[in-house]
Amino acid sequence: MSEAGAAAGRQTNTTTPSSRDGTGGDKTKTSFSDRVLSQLRGNPLVALLVAGAAAIAVIAVLMMWASSPSYRVLYNNLDEADGGRIITELDARGVPYRFSDNGQALMVPSDQVHSLRLYLAEQGLPQGGNVGLELMEDQAFGISQFAEQVNYQRGLEGELSRSIESLSPVIEQCS
């Protein structure tokens, strides 16, 4: 066999099995993830900066979530006049507040609920709504025993109503 014949035979047999079926052979096409990974391997500072920024963002979100106060109901079912007076007092003291249950419940930070109730009671607020045992304070001297019993019963009902409305499981079920 001559050299020309041997070279021609080699030329016809240059295709590989992988390039005939189209699955390989073209190494210039790489996926996006392969390119990104190769760039990150070449410059690890970029990966470090991205990871640091993500960690700072997660920490900032967690701190904002943890620092927001939880709110509890101060009063609910207030009439407009009492609600306006109470909001004026809360604004004067700089206490943050929210409305919930379609404006029926006035909510304040949970750590201030009891002190605000005492402060507002000292101011005579709320004036309307459920009347408790304070109904017994303003009785006339010559009131009959029957009227006294009725006022006492109304006072107990009002106190019981206030106690039930202040329980958080009851509030959650009503909304």
Image: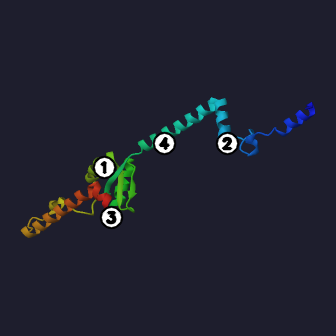
Q: Residue at x 40, y 54 (%)?
A: 98
- For disc 1, the marked residue is 113
Q: Position of residue 26 (x, y in %)?
A: 75, 40
Sequence-wise, which precedes: disc 1 or disc 4? 4
Identify which residue, 28 or 16, lies in the foreground: 16
Residue type at tag 1? Val
The secondary element bearing badge 4 is classed as helix
The secondary element bearing badge 1 is classed as helix
- For disc 3, the marked residue is 79
Q: Are marks 2 and 1 in contact (CB under 8 Å)?
A: no
Sequence-wise, which precedes: disc 4 or disc 3? 4
> Looking at the picture, does residue 37 appear above or below residue 116?
above
* Marks 1/4: CA–CA distance: 27 Å
Q: Residue at x 74, y 41 (%)?
A: 17
* Marks 4/3: CA–CA distance: 38 Å
Q: Are marks 2 and 4 in contact (CB under 8 Å)?
A: no
Q: Are marks 2 and 3 in contact (CB under 8 Å)?
A: no
Badge 4 crowding class, 10 Å Cα cut-off, few under 14, some 14 to 19, many 20 or more, is: few
Residue type at tag 4? Val
Sequence-wise, which precedes: disc 2 or disc 1? 2
* Marks 2/4: CA–CA distance: 31 Å
Q: Position of residue 82 (x, y in %)?
A: 32, 61
Colour convention: rainbow
Label at residue 61 = 4
- Depth check, mark 1 against mark 4: the one in front is 4
Residue type at tag 2? Phe
Sequence-wise, which precedes: disc 2 or disc 3? 2
- Depth check, mark 2 against mark 3: the one in front is 2
Q: Residue at x 15, y 59 (%)?
A: 137
